[in-house]
Image (spheres, grey):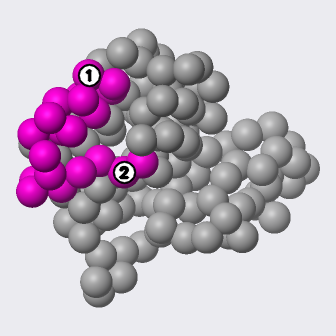
Amino acid sequence: MRPEVQTFVDAGPLPDWDGDEAEIDRRFEQLEAIAAPVTPDEAQALAGCFGPDDCYGVAWSLLHLIETSPGAVPRVSRPGPDADVWHEVLWKRWGNRGIVGPIGQVVGPVLGESADSSMAIDATGGVE
């Protein structure tokens, strides 16, 4: 993973609308430092950085950066009754499609679920 992507991921989820203006600006600058396209692994890591809302448009920039990956978009779990607005947006945009990797490659956890929900592609192209 490129250092600028790791820096963004290490900073955690985006702040919400009530976040400190300096923090929101810092996260936007971190995001702007990441050149597109991102790798499928970077896309999966970045997908864990969404906060509860659009963070004054920063989340939309993050979404568009993730979608520059040559792989499929990260999987998103179906939102529950207490899901935040952004989880709903990701579900509507990405649904339950997952990253498709080489046979046997673990494709990562579904967003909103534990790491135990990782899946792998079997020899028939199905998920095991």
Q: How many marks?
A: 2
Q: What is the secondary structure assignment of the residue under circle 1?
A: helix
Location of the C terminus (image quadrant) = bottom right
Dividing the picture into quadrants, the one containing residue 51 is: bottom left
Q: What is the secondary structure assignment of the residue under circle 2?
A: loop
Location of the N terminus (image quadrant) = top right
Task: Please give the residue where the numbered disc 1 appears in the rendered image.
Answer: 29
User: In terms of sequence position, does the residue under pointer 1 or pointer 2 come before the other?
Assistant: 2
Is residue 24 found left or right of 118 in the rendered image? Answer: left
Eyeballing the image, is 99 above or below 85?
Answer: above
Eyeballing the image, is 90 above or below 113?
Answer: above
Residue drawn where x is 42% and y is 48% of the image:
12
Q: Position of residue 95 (x, y in %)?
A: 41, 59
Q: Is residue 70 visible?
A: no
- Out of 26 and 123, give the one closest to the viewer: 26
Which span is picked out in magenta?
12-31
Residue drawn where x is 79% and y is 55% of the image:
120
Task: Please give the residue where the numbered disc 2 appears in the rendered image.
Answer: 13
Label 2 crowd bin: few (<14), some (14–19), many (20+), radius 10 Å: some
Q: Position of residue 92 (x, y in %)?
A: 29, 59
> Are the residues at dot 1 and dot 2 in contact (C-beta closer than 8 Å)?
no
Amino acid type for the residue under numbered disc 2: Pro
Q: Position of residue 76 (x, y in %)?
A: 46, 60
Q: CA distance from mark 1 to mark 2?
A: 15 Å
Label 1 crowd bin: few (<14), some (14–19), many (20+), radius 10 Å: few
Q: Position of residue 83 (x, y in %)?
A: 30, 76
Residue drawn where x is 80% and y is 37% of the image:
102
Q: Is residue 111 visible?
A: yes
Is residue 115 found left or right of 9 in the rendered image? Answer: right
Amino acid type for the residue under numbered disc 1: Glu
Is residue 30 found left or right of 56 in the rendered image? Answer: right
Q: Is residue 126 magenta?
A: no
